[in-house]
Image (cartoon, rainbow, N blue to C red):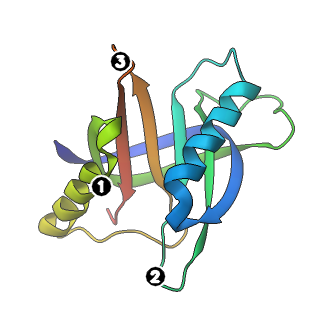
Amino acid sequence: MCQVVSRDFKVVAIKHQGRFEDYAVLVPQAAQQFLKRMPDFSGTEVSVYEPKMGETHIEGIYYVGILVEEKPESLPEEMEFLEIQQTYGMITGKGNELGRLYSTIDEWIDKQGHKRELAGSYIIETYHPVENDLEMVEIFIPIHA
């Protein structure tokens, strides 16, 4: 269920900022706004999060967008291109079980003796629709290789 992977993500996204405690509401709202701006997009939906660095780190930066194959020639206003290459602890599961998935991957990373890569790294979630309006999510937690 959990594994170590090295991935290169190319993302077209809109940058946002908010309180970490509000991400459960803010991120889905931002994703819906993104999809309304890009109604005929093709690509996997993605969220990219700055990790919380400690108790005094109240607000963070996050991006919502889509994965792309290569950097676009031009981007719509407010959108950015990100290229992120990292080694991750990764887990896949149902989108309605995010809390359990994060607990599972966090425990697995600790048990395997991996160290999280926080500074300058991003947590990434990719979303994959399946039947019955269900969504599968892949969670990538940056770790030291």
The residues tagged by marks 1 and 3 sit, at their Cα atoms, a distance apart of 21 Å
Q: Are marks 1 and 3 in contact (CB under 8 Å)?
A: no
The residues tagged by marks 1 and 2 sit, at their Cα atoms, a distance apart of 17 Å
Compared with 81, 23 (above or below) is below
Q: Amino acid at mark 3?
A: Val
**Residue 50 is at least partly visible in this image:** no
The residue tagged 3 is 130
Compared with 58, 13 (above or below) is above
Q: Amino acid at mark 1?
A: Tyr
Element under label 1? helix
Mark 2 neighbour class, 10 Å CA radius: few under 14, some 14 to 19, many 20 or more: few
Q: Is residue 72 left or right of residue 105?
A: right
Work out which quarter of the rendered image holds the C terminus and state it: bottom left
- Marker disc for residue 102: 1
Q: Is residue 18 left or right of residue 20?
A: right
Mark 1 neighbour class, 10 Å CA radius: few under 14, some 14 to 19, many 20 or more: some
Residue at 23% from the left image edge and 67% from the top image edge:
114
- Marker disc for residue 73: none
The residues tagged by marks 3 and 2 sit, at their Cα atoms, a distance apart of 35 Å
Q: Quadrant of residue 74?
A: top right
Work out which quarter of the rendered image holds the N terminus and state it: top left
